[in-house]
Image: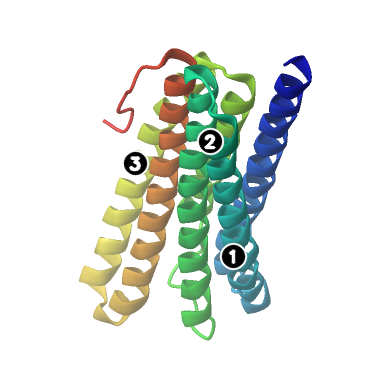
Amino acid sequence: MGSTRNAFERSLEELQQEILRMGSLVEQAIYNSVHSLATQNVDLANQVIEGDRLVDQLELEIEDKCLKLIATQQPMAVDLRKIGTGYKIITDLERMGDHAVDIARVTRRLANERLIKPLVDIPRMAAITQEMVKEGLDAYVKMDVELARKLCSRDDEVDHIYSQIFRELLTYMMEDPRTITQATYLLFVGRYIERIADHATNLAERVVYLVTGERLDLND
């Protein structure tokens, strides 16, 4: 019985490590996508788009491992929560990766245009969001409810920056209609980053549920 339990514990640890690997790839994709836009680096944007294949592949592999653990080990409530939480986390990570790809595609779309303004707030917003993702994954590894709850306050900061970006770009569009197309794409980028932050908040919710069994909506 002990050896069976030890093997199961090792499987859970391996699952966690694979989730962290996927998370690390997504964190890098978020950074690279926004950096590619700020520097108009199409090669870097293409790397993000190509790299998403590995993120998608990892999601499928981890999903399969979760289902096999449930089917073969018939885990008890606490262990089932661990597996279920991992399953939910990879869904959020995959969607974050998709939004990084969305940003990279905007880079390609605007590659031959002079940016209407130097990008300052968008990279700042992305940096906070990237930190939120890292903190969410750290909270997951440490099963740290306090850290999970703290990161949610940063979502308000992201929302505030997005509101600033929205107002500024709207002013550009009103003052010069020639900027409308590019400004709209940049608004899309801000929205993509905001959605990534929402998924990071979801990670925090998963951690709270994992540790306490309590279901919270921390996006409110």
Left or right position of 4 against 126: right
Which of the numbered marks, if any, corresponds to residue 52?
Answer: 1
Q: Position of residue 216 (x, y in %)?
A: 32, 23
Given residues 46 and 65, the one toward you in this image is 65
> Which label sits in the foreground, 1 or 3?
1
Asked whether residue 70 appears in the rendered view, the answer is yes
Q: Position of residue 37 (x, y in %)?
A: 55, 68
Residue at the disc numbered 3 = 159
Which of the numbered marks, if any, corresponds to residue 70?
Answer: 2
Three-letter code, disc 3: Asp
Disc 2/disc 3 C-alpha distance (Å)? 38 Å
Work out whether 38 lies above or below 129: below
Callout 1: SS: helix
Callout 2: SS: helix
Q: Residues within 10 Å of mark 1 (few under 14, many from 20)?
A: some
Q: Position of residue 119 (x, y in %)?
A: 50, 60
Outermost residue, left direction?
A: 174
x 46%, y 67%: residue: 102
